[in-house]
Image: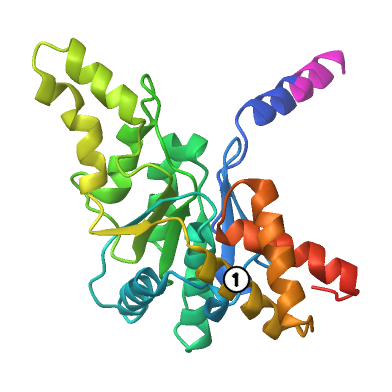
Amino acid sequence: MAKTKTLKRIAAALERLSPAPFGVPDFDNADAFVWHTEPDCLEPIVQVNRVDLALLIGVDRARDTLLENTLQFARGLPANNALLWGARGMGKSSLVKAVHAEVNTQGLPLKIVELQREDLPSVARLLSLLRGSQHRFLLYCDDLSFSHDDQHYKSLKAVLDGGIEGRPENVVFYATSNRRHLMPRDMIENERGSAINPSEAVEEKVSLSDRFGLWLGFHPCDQDEYLAMIDGYCAAYGVDVEPGILRAEAIEWQATRGSRSGRVAWQFFTDLAGRKGVAL
């Protein structure tokens, strides 16, 4: 009896150390998922945190380009991986989620899977899972960047190039970053200055961004664009404020923040809506 109990405890311990293989989720239950590891899991997201595509002001060229690329992919046509880079708070991640929603609105089923930068080493397992599905997937990584000793960029090549097996035909990869080359400029200069062959020292990491077929730049907005964003939010949510007062308060808000961006405009509008008793 004691021997049987001991064997059961050993078996239970082994199951905890080596969990059951990850089963394929039911992709029909949701349009959005988040990839987790330890153990591997695709968590369905019922309600995605996003804004309407029409409310994204000042990014018209990036919006149109990314939407057309995503529509091509959703229709089963060739499409490029995309890197959205540039100023903080100017709607890079919002645009990715808004485009995904717009494509689905047009009757083209497309799933979005968010991948954290820290989980890039597991991307081969994720791609293997997605490859076997009949659905099409937009794989999305927000705030992507690499430090000097960061080796995660090697895992990213599996997404962009796919190695000998190739990137799955039903997967496209979109990433956002504040850095055009996905690494700090001072790190690039330091490696060039200390290497025997300066060009080869950074070529492997810098060339990673070259593997994105689309580079979409986001730049700081001017005051007119900032105010237009706020006007758009007021119209969309039915917040009625006298134009002169709205302009003065909006300018004062951005002055206290020391910057203008889509994020600052939304933060001002959130405060305004709260003061006016309007639920968002």
Q: Residue at x 48, y 45 (%)?
A: 143
Seen in the image, is 211 located left or right of residue 138? left
| Quarter of the figure with residue 170 | bottom left
- Count all numbered tags in the image, as a single digit: 1
Where residue 259 sits in the image (x, y, percent)? 57, 50
Tell me where the magenta segment starts and ends, as one range: 1-9
Label 1 residue SS: helix
Magenta-drawn stretch, dominant element (helix, strand or loop): helix
Q: Residue at x 29, y 40 (%)?
A: 181
The residue nearer to you, when weighing 8 against 191, is: 191
Q: Residue at x 77, y 82 (%)?
A: 242
Q: Is residue 95 above or below residue 235?
A: above
Instruction: Locate the C terminus and report the quarter of the image it occupies.
Output: bottom right
Where residue 261 sits in the image (x, y, percent)? 55, 57
Seen in the image, is 158 located left or right of residue 264? left
Q: Is residue 193 rendered magenta in the image?
A: no
Where residue 165 sits in the image (x, y, percent)? 22, 50
The residue nearer to you, when weighing 63 against 213, is: 63
Q: Is residue 8 rendered magenta in the image?
A: yes
Seen in the image, is 110 located left or right of residue 211? right
Residue 227 is at least partly visible in this image: yes
Residue 97 is at least partly visible in this image: no
Q: Amino acid at mark 1?
A: Leu
Question: How many residues crowd around disc 1 within 10 Å: few (fewer than 14), some, or many (20 or more)?
Answer: many
Where residue 201 sits in the image (x, y, percent)? 17, 21
In this picture the colour scheme is rainbow
Instruction: Locate the N terminus and report the quarter of the image it occupies.
Output: top right
Seen in the image, is 188 located left or right of residue 254? left
The residue nearer to you, when weighing 114 against 8, is: 114
| Quarter of the figure with residue 270 | bottom right
Q: Is residue 187 above or below residue 270?
A: above
Q: Which residue is mark 1?
A: 227
